[in-house]
Image (spheres, coloured by chain):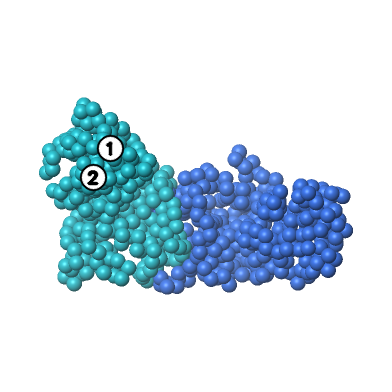
Chain colours: A cyan, B blue
Amino acid sequence: MTPEQAMRDAIALSEAVRGTTSPNPPVGAVICDADDVVVGRGATQPPGGPHAEVMALRGAGERARGGIAYVTLEPCAHHGRTPPCADALLDAGVRAVHYAVADPTPAAQGGSAVLEQAGVTTTQGLLADDVRRGPLRAWLHFVRTGRPHVTWKYAATLDGRVAADDGTSRWISGEPARAEVHDLRTKIDAIVAGTGTVLVDDPRLTARDADGRLTDRQPLRVVVGTRALPESARVLDDSADTVVIATHDPDKVLTELADRGVVDVLLEGGPTLAGAFAKAGRIDRLLAYIAPALAGAGPAALGDAGVSTVTDMHRWVVEEVTMTGDDVRVSAVPAHQD
Amino acid sequence: MTPEQAMRDAIALSEAVRGTTSPNPPVGAVICDADDVVVGRGATQPPGGPHAEVMALRGAGERARGGIAYVTLEPCAHHGRTPPCADALLDAGVRAVHYAVADPTPAAQGGSAVLEQAGVTTTQGLLADDVRRGPLRAWLHFVRTGRPHVTWKYAATLDGRVAADDGTSRWISGEPARAEVHDLRTKIDAIVAGTGTVLVDDPRLTARDADGRLTDRQPLRVVVGTRALPESARVLDDSADTVVIATHDPDKVLTELADRGVVDVLLEGGPTLAGAFAKAGRIDRLLAYIAPALAGAGPAALGDAGVSTVTDMHRWVVEEVTMTGDDVRVSAVPAHQD
């Protein structure tokens, strides 16, 4: 196995535990033996459980000795709820550690220095962009800014409508796009919607499989706004936890969510709340499912975002455009990162 | 040269004369000699001039004898303003003719039968989809329906706005997208806008190069609507021909344009006129430049299109999604062709 293949494996392991590790990062690790054969694979366990390196080393056992570890994040050097991963790698006798991204946290960083001092070769940067844009994106943002990472997801027509003139919106996007969103919901910590959307659409805000069954993991449901909800609102049922945050200020929402250990947020609507987040510069990624449909009337995807003239429009950079079923899927990030 | 390469050459020749041949089709032809070496290339000349096959045969001269002709459209069999191309190919002594698409016009079709009867091998279908979707799309539509082909082009933000709240729209899309539209304008017969857009934006509706100079060929400028235009409107200047059609009925517009020999129309706005065309089912292709920008306010790309509920939305099929500069370019056709 080549180093790149091994790191791709580690990234896949990392992706597979997204949404289950916050506030810890979802890390993946692969151990190859001295002959470059994979002998251990691991990923971060839920908070309090072992980190990825330890899980992978447990799988490898004695075969790790003289081998190489591939990790998406620099192994930690601190005693948190678990012992330092750098020590575990030293104890296991690996001869080299490749990690994609350096650990930016003051408490945990320094793992590579510990390893180097003990004679283990370390290299940084292998597939770093894939990791930064992928499984560690939200956590790195959280560490850098202190705020949860916000992905605004919406589904609209080509002319930007999220519903028809009579308010109907089921379904603008196709089944593959909706399935993808349910899959995404299982990978994030919290899903945020406004009271307006809850009152109009009465959404469940749960992650469900193709048969409509709840998936094992459910994100925290967060309803933002000051309008009262009826007790019968689906979002208040017992299929997942729900918090109501009575504010219109995105920063107050994000502070409260950060206090709850939320790192990765999916903002699902509606236009008013999305506009408030856009105006505050609190959308870190945009995920648009543009259905090949024209409505000519109905609410637009985004409400007032503090823009009055073309030069003040919020500008983004497209990261990726793909088709999801019949819909165009656009992933974008702010042109000017704060 | 392989048959496919030769046909690709013919398609490129065909593309190169788009916008200069209406109401005749923009056809391309390549002649290879008996050793598969290209000896002649031609494309349809302006109305009254020679067709593509004749131009290519003129280039080939005696070297056409025993060779193969590659043509985007079945060679015509009729005496119009020029003699039948099938006869010209027979006179030149080619041994085979590959054409992409059969000629659907009652008067001109039958060229392949004439050739076959004279002992020339003919085959149909090589790169037919490329031709149907490409240079002959508008003409084939015109022959099939009797109406000019309408491409609705718009540039909007991700939230579907074609201008900011204060009406400013320069520039929502980037320079590469705008350059591409100017290039497209040189390839169509007429560009259509509503009086509303003319009154608000005072557009020139001309094709210009990167330095702002008029290109050699200008489409007919068509202003649709009943509102009076000031004499100072740029669209009334002498840089290109302009017609004003005082109606709100897309079919009346298209009938008048068909009478003028217009085959290929670019509908450039604004939302009200586009809505009328969408409602009438008279948009045959949609070309959206979606700028990675968010406005949160301002006019939507499409006005009333007769849709009140989600199940009545106009549905499209995405043909192609690409990036043009920083903008997402979506080309789509109606899901249900009339």
Mark 1 vs 2: CB contact within 8 A:
yes
Q: Which residue is mark 1?
A: A67
Q: Amino acid at mark 1?
A: Gly
Q: Is residue B249 visible?
A: yes
Badge 2 sits on which subunit?
Answer: A
**Residue with the mark numbered 2:** A60
Query: Residue B262: x and y, percent?
Result: 69, 61
Q: Secondary structure at mark 1?
A: loop
Q: Residue at x 44, y 54 (%)?
A: A322
User: Residue B61, position in %: x, y?
Assistant: 86, 49
Asked whether the residues under marks 1 and 2 belong to the same chain, the reply is yes
Residue B264 image position (x, y, % from top left): 65, 60
In the picture, measured across the screen, residue A79 lies left or right of residue A172, that is: left
> Residue A174 sits in which quadrant?
bottom left
Q: Earlier in the sequence, mark 1 or mark 2?
A: 2
Q: Quadrant of the C terminus of chain A?
A: top left
Q: Toward the viewer: A72 or A4? A: A4
How crowded pointer 2 is (Cα within 10 Å; few <14, some 14-19, many 20+) is rated as many
